[in-house]
Amino acid sequence: MTSLPTQLNHKDILLPFKNKVIFVDWHGVISNENFWHNKSKSENHYLNKIATEISERVFSDDIIIEKWLRGEIDYQQIIHDFHSESSKHTKLKIANRLLKYFHEIELNIKLLKTLSEYRNEAFIVMATDNMDCFFKSLPDFKYLGLFDSVLSSNKLGVLKKEDPDVFFGEWLSAHSLNFSNAILIDDSIANCNRFTEKGGHAINYTIGSKINLKNKLKEWFTFSNQESLIA
């Protein structure tokens, strides 16, 4: 089985000419949907009950969540460990539903449209603390072509706030950029603070906030272009 490539833009012949990057978080920024949101139309369907039970048990255990985010355990192990009483057939159905995460998902279309306006000026990179099932489901994301790359904690082995140099720095170096060329859009204040400590810029943003993201990005581009002229 081949893994999903981190470079997603097939028109990458133009990419070396970009000298800025917009890193964008997933949950709370692009979508608020949790795993197993796509439940059966029947509220009493047995798979709904099992998915809800697994979700409640897993997401109440911070240690398990962080291990899952770092790629130390996978979704199949999660389903097995947190619902061991289910049959192999039932576990397969639960897993298949989990991998349909992007089915009928609610997205922040306004944000995606704003990002698309900057595709010629900057790399657009998804930067998410997320699980293997999210990464495995990504090919079903219909706006995937908007992003040049995807950085996910389950592949990198660290969370954004734990080690920004590993999470972001290696990608930046590979594209001859540094943190001063980058801006992060994230709903976590801790992630934003760690990013700015490294010399980057950040916008603490959540879906439904009153922040005018388009204006914030315009201000950053103006500021960073002026700094480049001074340098």
Image (cartoon, helix red, strand yellow):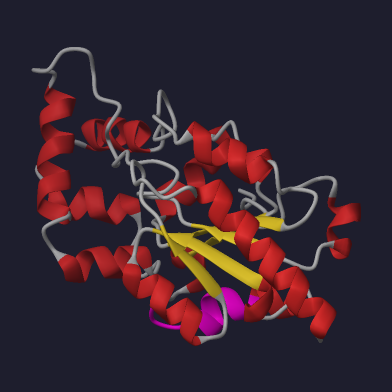
The quadrant holding residue 54 is top left
The reply to whether residue 14 is in sight is yes
Between 44 and 28, the one lying in front of the other is: 28
Is residue 169 highlighted in magenta? yes
Q: Report the side of 123 relative to 142 (left or right).
A: right
Say if 8 sits above or below 94 in the image: below
Q: Report the side of 156 relative to 17 (left or right).
A: left
Residue at 13% x, 35% y: name it: 50
Residue at 29% x, 70% y: name it: 67
The quadrant holding residue 140 is top right
Locate residue 150, reporting x and y percent.
59, 56
Give the tally of numbered discs.
0
Q: Report the side of 61 relative to 224 (left or right).
A: left
The reply to whether residue 83 is in sight is no
Instruction: Identify the main secondary structure in magenta.
Output: helix
Locate residue 48, reporting x and y percent.
16, 27
Between 125 and 58, the one lying in front of the other is: 125
Locate residue 149, reporting x and y percent.
66, 56
Locate residue 169, reporting x and y percent.
61, 80
| Quadrant of the snapshot with the C terminus | bottom right
Residue at 79% x, 68% y: name it: 19
Say if 162 sits above or below 86 in the image: below
Is residue 172 highlighted in magenta? no
Looking at the rendering, the stretch of residues picked out in magenta corresponds to: 161-170
